[in-house]
Image (cartoon, rainbow, N blue to C red):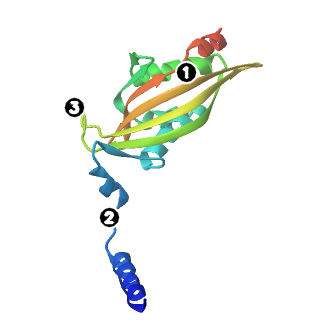
């Protein structure tokens, strides 16, 4: 019995001393896996910074989070950064206050780049709350942002425009 216990202690000691692989590196070779997902990264922080600057009206910071040639796909309608900023300026011109409530946000880092050289995508859910006087409109938004070299380079957003149209009246 003593030999079995000593053998068990020896086996546990050897196992405890072996080098452990990093979980992300070890799982990257898993069958069918093409990347890893994180809930908090510099890119998720960039995404939040962009939206918080939009909320506060800090257009300089908002613009700085995007690449100059970024393309926004709002409900599959494509627009430039200037056009996107003009949309939010129209809210401000009508006295509409913007508030954002974040939902889940995560980053996927793919093993292989796409044709544009992008491997990183930040996905997020949020509620956009627009207030004008005593009227409030809410819309639920899902976005995916491609990130390259510390800038948001392409964005896809899906949302119902009805709430925005209603508060703009």
Label whose residue precedes the other's in the sequence (1 or 2): 2
Residue sticking out furthest to the bottom: 2
Residue placed under numbered mark 3 in the picture: 115
Disc 1 to disc 2: CB gap under 8 Å = no
In the picture of the structure, the residue carrying the numbered disc 2 is 21
On the rendered image, what quadrant is the N terminus found in? bottom left
Q: Nearer the viewer, mark 1 or mark 2?
A: 2
Percent across and percent down for residue 33 are 30, 44
Mark on residue 89? 1
- The residue at the point 63 percent across, 12 percent down is 168
Image position of 124 (left or right of 118): right
Toward the front, the furthest residue is 1
Residue occupying the point 50% across, 40% down: 105
Q: Earlier in the sequence, mark 1 or mark 3?
A: 1
Q: Mark 1 and mark 3: span between their CA atoms?
A: 33 Å
Q: Are marks 3 and 2 in contact (CB under 8 Å)?
A: no
Pair 1/3: label in front: 3
């Amino acid at each position: 019995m003593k030999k079995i216990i000593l053998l068990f202690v020896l086996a546990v000691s050897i196992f405890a001393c072996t080098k452990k692989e990093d979980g992300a590196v070890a799982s990257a070779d898993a069958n069918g896996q093409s990347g890893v997902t994180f809930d908090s990264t510099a890119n998720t922080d960039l995404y939040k910074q962009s939206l918080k600057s939009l909320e506060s009206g800090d257009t300089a910071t908002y613009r700085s989070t995007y690449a100059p040639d970024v393309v926004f796909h709002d409900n599959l309608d494509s627009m430039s950064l200037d056009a996107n900023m003009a949309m939010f300026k129209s809210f401000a011109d009508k006295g509409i206050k913007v508030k954002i409530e974040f939902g889940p946000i995560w980053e996927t880092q793919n093993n292989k780049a796409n044709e544009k050289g992008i491997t990183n995508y930040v996905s997020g859910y949020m509620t956009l709350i627009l207030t004008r006087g005593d009227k409030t409109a809410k819309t639920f938004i899902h976005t995916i942002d491609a990130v390259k070299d510390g800038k948001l380079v392409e964005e896809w957003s899906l949302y119902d425009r009805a709430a925005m149209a209603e508060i703009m009246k």
